[in-house]
């Protein structure tokens, strides 16, 4: 594919979301653009069983970026290549629940044999392990030992999460340490080149006529996840079919002009949400005040806007008290350092990101 886009074939099926229903569409693809360049390296490392220290492999990013799709596709392809190998795929919640059941029924050794002897273990939604209030520490400790056993015997572990392990509140330092010893792959929403390729793949699978020029036009007007792209394409195709017409430039322009979608949070939204979280005034967070609480809150707001938003350094500096580029970067780095050692700041960033980018 053009534009630095790579189409990675995987086993299994694509899950499409349409009118609240889920349906399978085969074959399975994972389209990688420049914004997700590490994915190709990670997939090759797992499937070739490279001994480069890439296990555990942690796939993390916002909802809809394809973490589960990729992890399950890897598991299916691994199974097709290694018929006799044990592949275990589960969620963090089910891992904790199964451990609790094993403890209650005195079947811990069977539980450990299942997970520690797997050639490939896929564990989805790591952050939910911390949300398990009952026995969460024992579940995390058990996962630490499971990871140690897998690495020692040359097994592979793939974990998905909504954020990097160090930014997930409630995750034990020892578990964070094991996970960050492998390969961390951030997943972002597809860029315009990848969106164009994804739309063409989806159109071909659904037998929708969508020339490359129209796919590009639609991709440049849509910023979203694969399910959102799929839903947009099917809605557009259905509207045109009702009128007995094919998708054309006019139909795409009309759709883009009238569609409703999630709004990217503005600097005002980010600063206001951060101020409320830290029980401060918006004007104070935006000011040049140097109180410790203000500096911390301002740093979190700047980090969120820089890491997850679209604002430039100049826009950030202008909005937050007329600061220069160097000061903005210094604020980001300070917050990044805090994320490594301060659980309260990790929780703040996690909660605010969930509130602002998942509404």
Image (spheres, helix red, strand yellow):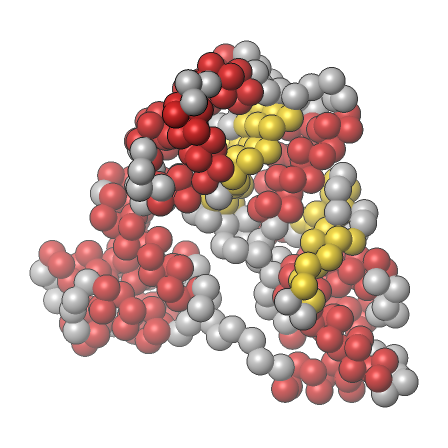
Q: Quadrant of residue 75?
A: top right
Residue 180 visible in the current orientation: no
Q: From the viewer's perspective, is residue 61 above or below residue 80? A: below
Q: Given the current orientation, which residue lies at the most extreme top position?
A: 153
In the foreground, 91 or 318: 91
In the foreground, 269 or 133: 133
Residue at x 32% of width, y 33% of height: 135
x and y, in percent, of residue 317 in the image: 30, 68
Q: Is residue 304 left or right of residue 151?
A: left
Q: Is residue 99 left or right of residue 27?
A: left
Residue 280 visible in the current orientation: yes
Residue at x 74% of width, y 18% of height: 84
Q: Quadrant of residue 272?
A: bottom left
**What is the quadrant of the C terminus in the image?**
bottom left
Residue at x 53% of width, y 22% of height: 115
x and y, in percent, of residue 338 in the image: 25, 45
Q: Is residue 146 left or right of residue 298?
A: right
């Amino acid at each position: 594919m053009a534009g630095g886009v790579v189409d990675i074939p995987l086993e299994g099926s694509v899950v499409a979301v349409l009118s609240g229903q889920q349906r399978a569409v085969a074959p399975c693809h994972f389209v990688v653009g420049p914004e997700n360049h590490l994915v190709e390296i990670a997939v090759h490392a797992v499937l070739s069983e490279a001994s480069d220290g890439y296990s555990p492999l942690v796939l993390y990013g916002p909802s809809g970026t394809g973490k589960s799709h990729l992890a399950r596709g890897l598991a299916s392809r691994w199974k097709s290549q290694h018929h006799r190998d044990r592949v275990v795929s589960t969620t963090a919640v089910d891992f904790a629940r199964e451990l609790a059941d094993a403890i209650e029924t005195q079947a811990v050794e069977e539980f450990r044999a299942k997970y520690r002897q797997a050639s490939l273990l896929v564990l989805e939604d790591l952050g939910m392990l911390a949300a398990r209030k009952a026995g969460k520490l024992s579940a995390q400790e058990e996962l630490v030992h499971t990871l140690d056993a897998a690495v020692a015997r040359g097994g592979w572990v793939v974990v998905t999460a909504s954020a990097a392990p160090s930014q997930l509140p409630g995750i034990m330092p020892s578990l964070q340490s094991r996970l960050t010893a492998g390969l961390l792959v951030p997943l972002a929403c597809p860029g315009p080149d990848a969106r164009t390729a994804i739309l063409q793949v989806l159109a071909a699978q659904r037998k929708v006529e969508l020339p490359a020029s129209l796919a590009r036009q639609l991709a440049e007007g849509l910023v979203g996840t694969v399910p959102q792209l799929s839903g947009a394409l099917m809605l557009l195709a259905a509207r045109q079919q009702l009128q007995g017409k094919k998708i054309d430039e006019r139909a795409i322009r009309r759709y883009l002009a009238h569609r409703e979608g999630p709004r990217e949070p503005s600097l005002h939204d980010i600063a206001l949400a951060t101020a409320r979280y830290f029980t401060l005034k918006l004007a104070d967070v935006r000011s040049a005040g140097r109180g410790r609480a203000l500096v911390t809150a301002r740093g979190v707001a700047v980090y969120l806007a820089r890491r997850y938003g679209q604002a430039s350094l100049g826009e950030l500096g202008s909005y937050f008290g007329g600061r220069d580029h160097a000061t903005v970067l210094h604020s980001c780095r300070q917050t990044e350092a805090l994320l490594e050692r301060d659980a309260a700041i990790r929780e703040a960033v996690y909660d605010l990101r969930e509130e602002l980018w998942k509404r």
